[in-house]
Image: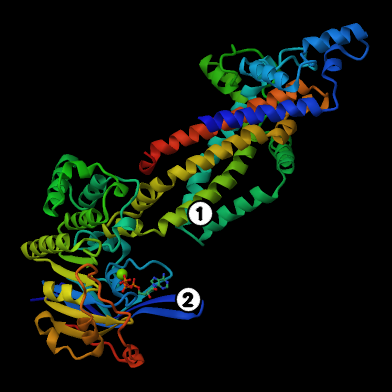
Amino acid sequence: MTNLLDVENLRVTFPTRSGTFEAVRGISFSLGRERLGIVGESGSGKSMTGRAILKLIRKPGIVTADRMRMGDTNLLTASEREMRRIRGRHASMIMQDPKFSLNPVMTVGSQITEALLTHEKTSRAEARKRAVGMLDAVAIRNPERVMGLYPHEVSGGMGQRIMIAMMLIPNPEILIADEPTSALDVSVQLQVLEIMDKLVTDRGMGLIFISHDLNLVSNFCDRILIMYAGRIVEVCQAGKLHEAKHPYTIGLLNSVPDLEHPRPRLDALQRDPAWREAPSVSALT
Amino acid sequence: MLTVAVTLLGLLFVTFMIGRVMPIDPVLAVIGERATQAQYDEVFLELGLDKPLITQFAIYVNDVLHGDFGTSIRTGKLVSEDIGRVFPATLELATLGTLIGVFLGVPLGVLAAVYRGRWIDQVARFVGLIGYSMPIFWLGLMGLLIFYGILGWVAGPGRLGVFYQGLVPERSGLLLLDSLLAGDWTVFKDAFSHIILPASLLGYYSLAYISRMTRSFMLEQLNSEYITTARVKGLSEWTVIWRHAFRNIRIQLITVIALAYANLLEGSVLTEIIFAWPGIGQYITTSLLSNDMNSVLGGTVVIGTIFVALNIFSDLLYRFFDPRAK
Ligand SMILES: Nc1ncnc2c1ncn2[C@@H]1O[C@H](COP(=O)(O)OP(=O)(O)OP(=O)(O)O)[C@@H](O)[C@H]1O
Ligand SMILES: [Mg+2]
């Protein structure tokens, strides 16, 4: 079976006043029809990896790679026009912070239907019907009413589910989910994860699931990349996490999250400067 | 609503006080230097100058509320009549100027933000620089010299050529509108050829301001996360810019445009003088030079009121366009 995505030696660089800053420092991985988790502390380059795949790193950021292929498309040489056809339709991304990631002056409904109408020739009425259905699928009560709301009128958890609905509606093959459940409380979190899991399995998508929370990811994903300072320090099958060798991974595992605050407390974690310089582990399959 | 009332009352208080502290005797202004003492006393009482200041102020406010600003000693007519005559000229000029500023300045600002650092951004910056550093009378005189004197593309100073005066019935006082309503194309053309140069000049200054503000508003929006979300959906750049980013600056733009408009309504004095434009700026200036305080204060009150009214209007639009303000 061919992979949905292959990335080799991906780098994301930002010029700064004091030289250049590498947010992602040469990582390689591939994605099949699987659930791939990316875990790492804040600033380790998870979101930048997701954006680089869609070629949405803003200037003056620079993306380089030896290879970056999605299906039959070479992303490295793809024009902006080709990228627009890919974005949304073939690969989509649930953005990290719904509070800032939804347009404040457009209704929820128009933002969701827009995602569909960009890629499919359907009538507005039909698009609306499907948007309502999608909101229903992500367990939003009274979806008809929510369609007419503005982002400031919905809660953070609802915003995340709206985001999920919006990105799933054009039925992409690859879904990058950047902390899709971080604003949800634990019960809703599980519910939303279940919904995503079902949608991903039913539609045969490849999912990249970005999170801080190693325990959450280990329950939900098939394979896990551990990122540290822009590199992959370890790759694990979710079931074999107990075999993890890297001290950083072990540290993440041991920092057991309490249920009220599902984020692991990483501050107490000891870090070895050598981790930063160790070569990136390949997660190509 | 209360703040509006207070603002207006404050404005009236200021104009009232100016009228009292000016070293111009309001009685002499009415009766002239050679009147007898008896006549003087009579007018003194008639004007209520024997009453306490607070009563005088109340009378003043009451008069103003009834549209009574007294009589102009220069024209001998009611100040309100004078203003009714000159104000449409200013309104027409400022409106056309603002339209030019908006329709050129907004797209220019948007393009400058989208193509930041590229040539169009440089052009916008250059336009802004000239708009900020060139005195308006210099640009005005150069404009007259080149487009009227040398090229002859436009008409000279004034609102209308002598042959066209009084040809169309006055309805709104706006010559362009009145001539259109009357269907008189020759008058329209002449009025247009008179107004286009001063309006472009004012429009240019508006454009410089509006494009600079639009650019910075747009830059802020284009850097927000929801713009990346829009791109993730695969939207075209046009849609991202206009449907997503621009929608978010409409609210701020309304305020900027209202301010630019108010600026042209009250601040086009120099332009009106250079182009012999019979508007309210020129009216106030001429009145001031002939110690005609009733006209000066009346004109000031009218302009202040317009300023407040524009603020209210932009506030209302704000509420209409911003879902968060409801
Ligand atoms: N425009 C930029 N210029 C310079 N550095 C940047 C820029 N954008 C992001 N970075 C840096 O890139 C690094 C990686 O950021 P990224 O958003 O990928 O982290 P993350 O792993 O997603 O963290 P979090 O868990 O907090 O979301 C961070 O250290 C950030 O400071
Ligand atoms: Mg992130």
Q: Quadrant of the N terminus of chain A?
A: bottom left
In the image, taking residue B282 as reference, residue B29 lies left or right, namely: right
Query: For residue B44, what is the image quadrant?
Result: top right
Query: For residue A192, what is the image quadrant?
Result: bottom left
Above or below residue A5? Residue B222 is above
Q: Which residue is at a point 15% across and 44% down the rendered structure image?
A: A142
Q: Amino acid at mark 2?
A: Thr
Labelled disc at residue B128: none
Query: In this orientation, which residue lies closer to the viewer: A34 or B48?
Result: B48
For label 2, count other residues whose C-alpha is less than 10 Å away and answer few (under 14), some (14-19) or many (20+).
Answer: few
Residue bearing the label numbered 2: A16
Q: Position of residue B121 (x, y in %)?
A: 53, 57
Helix, strand or loop at mark 1: helix
CB of mark 2 near ligand 1 (< 8 Å): yes
Visible in this render: residue B1? yes
Residue bearing the label numbered 1: B216
Q: Which residue is at a point 33% across and 51% down the rendered structure image?
A: A103
Helix, strand or loop at mark 2: strand
Q: Which residue is at a point 44% across and 35% down the rendered structure image?
A: B317
Q: Position of residue B139 (x, y in %)?
A: 71, 43
Q: Which residue is at a point 64% across and 31% down the rendered structure image?
A: B10
